[in-house]
Image (spheres, helix red, strand yellow):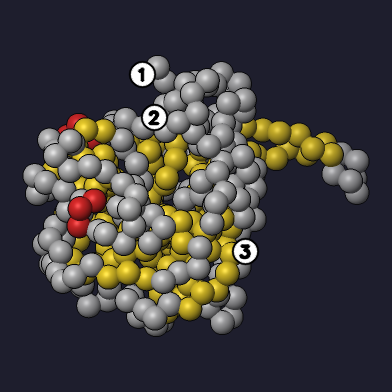
């Protein structure tokens, strides 16, 4: 499929001018959002490993006159400063799973014991209808990745909480302090399981979490003694979150974290700490002139906390990380 490029996007740090109201002088402001301007990127999953941040994003490839998701591959970018981003060769496609037939939807990579596990959303082949979650593995964050188990970890016939075929999407994985890993995912119903130590098998029954207006895109992170479960809320989607003292809940709803992402109906976040600063990674439809719900772009903002551990509202900016 033809890839979309924008010659008017000079670089990741395009300079814009504005007038300072007090001095009446023109000052230059760096525009660092979106962080990628030569491709449409969406559904970011972020990994901090050693001295770099890696963003694994879906590639929106829908032509300008097509309003549907066309996502055939995942893209990977890395940064040492959250300002400049390097693109790497494509490490994984849905076709790398023999049991899948397409759709590179939301995903997340996590490291354990020197191995990197990539949990992905794809469409299963005709043998099982609907979306499924697979796992790929590699020896480094840039791959090459390969199917870890030769079949899907989660399929639509395993979950009966809804009748829709796309309720098994948007995996997020967190490894707790005791080394146990938990997988959260879902659409309209948030679900989770504990994983076995090998990261590729379920350990126990699928559980559900009752969250207000849960749509999709769960993300788990921890700060101090608090666990945070953020997710896409309602539609068009905002990001809301809940907090708990345990990774399995009970979860207390805390409200909205991020508003509707401009002209994108979807909202998908990753939350990470890097070099002592917390960051909120998300997508919007910000690239002119064809950006929107099916041609999205990854952005980054700093994230801050209140004294009680709650998160301060995200303010989406053009400047991004300076």
Name which quarter of the figure residue 112 lies in: bottom left
CA neighbours of label 2 inside 10 A, class few (<14), some (14 to 19), many (20+): many
In the rendered image, the vertical position of residue 238 relative to residue 227, given as above or below: above
Q: Tell me which numbered mark, 2 or 1, is placed earlier along the sequence.
A: 1
Marks 2 and 1 sit apart, C-alpha to C-alpha, by: 9 Å
Q: Quadrant of the N terminus?
A: top left
Q: Which of 88 and 171 is in front in this view?
A: 171
Residue 23 x %, y %: 90, 45
User: What is the total number of numbered labels drawn onto the structure image?
Assistant: 3
Q: Which numbered disc, 3 or 1, marks the residue closer to the eye?
A: 1
Quadrant in which residue 92 is drawn? top left
- At 73% from the left edge and 37% from the top edge, which residue is drawn? 28
**Residue displayed at 18% across by 36% down:** 125
Residue 252 image position (x, y, % from top left): 48, 78
**At 34% from the left edge and 41% from the top edge, which residue is drawn?**
105
- Assess whether mark 1 and mark 2 are in contact (beta carbons under 8 angstroms): yes
Would residue 3 be found to the left or right of residue 321 on screen? left
- Which residue matches tag 2? 70
Residue at 40% over, 17% down: 2
Please give left or right for residue 318 compared with residue 134 in the image: right
Q: To which residue does mark 3 refer?
A: 313
Earlier sequence position, callout 2 versus callout 3: 2
Residue 309 to residue 55: above or below: below
Closest to the observer, 22 or 210: 210
Q: Is residue 39 visible?
A: no
Q: Is mark 1 on a helix, strand or loop?
A: loop
Against 237, residue 67 (above or below) is above
Residue 1 - label: 1
Look at the numbered disc 3 and give the secondary structure of its residue. Answer: loop
Q: 88 or 134, which is in the foreground?
A: 134
Image position of 116 (left or right of 4): left
Give the spatial CA distance, label 3 vs label 1.
38 Å
């Amino acid at each position: 499929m033809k890839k979309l490029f924008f010659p008017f996007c000079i670089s990741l740090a395009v300079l814009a001018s504005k007038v300072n109201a007090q001095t009446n002088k023109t000052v230059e402001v760096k525009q660092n959002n979106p962080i990628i301007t030569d491709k449409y990127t969406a559904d970011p999953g972020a990994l901090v490993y050693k001295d770099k941040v890696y963003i694994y994003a879906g590639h929106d490839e829908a032509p300008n006159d097509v309003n549907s998701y066309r996502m055939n591959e995942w893209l990977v970018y890395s940064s040492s400063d959250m300002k400049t981003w390097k693109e790497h060769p494509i490490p994984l496609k849905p076709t790398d799973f023999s049991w899948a037939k397409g759709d590179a939807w939301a995903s997340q990579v996590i490291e354990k014991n020197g191995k990197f596990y990539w949990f992905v959303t794809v469409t299963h082949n005709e043998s099982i209808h609907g979306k499924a979650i697979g796992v790929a593995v590699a020896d480094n964050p840039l791959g090459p990745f390969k199917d870890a188990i030769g079949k899907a970890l989660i399929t639509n016939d395993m979950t009966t909480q809804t009748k829709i075929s796309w309720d098994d999407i948007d995996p997020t994985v967190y490894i707790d302090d005791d080394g146990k890993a938990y997988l959260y995912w879902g659409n309209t119903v948030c679900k989770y399981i504990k994983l076995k130590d090998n990261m590729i098998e379920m350990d126990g029954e699928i559980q559900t979490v009752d969250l207000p207006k849960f749509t999709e895109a769960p993300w788990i992170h921890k700060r101090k003694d608090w666990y945070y479960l953020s997710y896409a809320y309602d539609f068009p989607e905002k990001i809301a979150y809940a907090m708990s003292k345990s990774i399995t809940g009970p979860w207390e709803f805390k409200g909205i974290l991020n508003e509707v992402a401009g002209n994108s109906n979807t909202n998908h976040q990753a939350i990470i700490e890097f070099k002592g600063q917390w960051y909120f990674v998300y997508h919007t439809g910000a690239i002119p002139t064809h950006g929107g719900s099916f041609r999205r772009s990854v952005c980054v903002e700093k994230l801050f906390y209140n004294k009680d551990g709650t998160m301060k509202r995200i303010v989406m900016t053009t400047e991004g990380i300076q």
